[in-house]
Image (cartoon, helix red, strand yellow):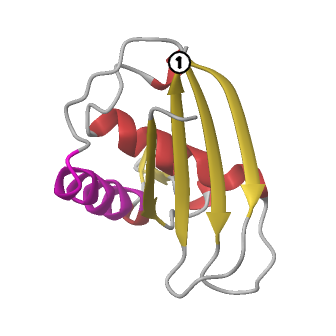
Amino acid sequence: MADYDFTMPWPPTINHWHQPWRGRIIKGAKARKYESDAVAWLKSIGLNGERLANDLRVKLTLHPPTNARYDIDNRTKGVFDSLSAADFWVDDSQVVELSIAKGEKVKGGMVEVSVTML
């Protein structure tokens, strides 16, 4: 049984996460918007500022907004970075076990997140 079960908005692909700008690599506009929206969402459900410090087991179930094909590993960065930005955990390096599954399409898309402290 997980210590935390919640949903998060559907993240942009990692391909849009970092963008070149004037010779540097910066967080892209889609990534910044997602992180801002996800942090606001986590705050609204009371999961900002938890500051979990344990090693963690995380399970993600991806529910895409369309039937378009997608790479299962391209959505993790947005979810993890947003959890870090919301101070849900100290750092995503605490995740020692990760499982990712494709779920059914849902309107707007979402990610089911289960976190277990070890």
Q: Which image quadrant is residue 71 in?
A: bottom right
Q: Is residue 25 visible?
A: no
Q: Quadrant of the C terminus?
A: top right
Residue ID for mark 1: 93
Q: Is residue 58 visible?
A: yes
Residue occupying image coordinates x 51% and y 62%: 11
Relative to the observer, which residue lies in front, 59 or 108? 59
Query: Is 42 one of the magenta-colored residues?
Result: yes
Say above or below: 54 vs 29.
Answer: above
Residue 61 on image: x %, y %: 66, 56
Question: Which amino acid does the dot numbered 1 rest on?
Answer: Ser
Residue occupying image coordinates x 26% and y 39%: 86
Q: Residue furthest front?
A: 1
Magenta stretch, residue numbers = 31-46
Magenta-drawn stretch, dominant element (helix, strand or loop)? helix
Mark 1 residue crowding within 10 angstroms, few (<14) / some (14–19) / many (20+): few
Q: Say how many tags the image has.
A: 1
Residue 1 on image: x %, y %: 58, 34
Query: Is 36 one of the magenta-colored residues?
Result: yes
**Side (left or right) of 70 relative to 58:** right
**Side (left or right) of 89 relative to 58:** left
Residue occupying image coordinates x 69% and y 32%: 98
Residue 28 on image: x %, y %: 42, 57
Relative to the observer, which residue lies in front, 106 or 2? 2
**Side (left or right) of 3 relative to 64:** left
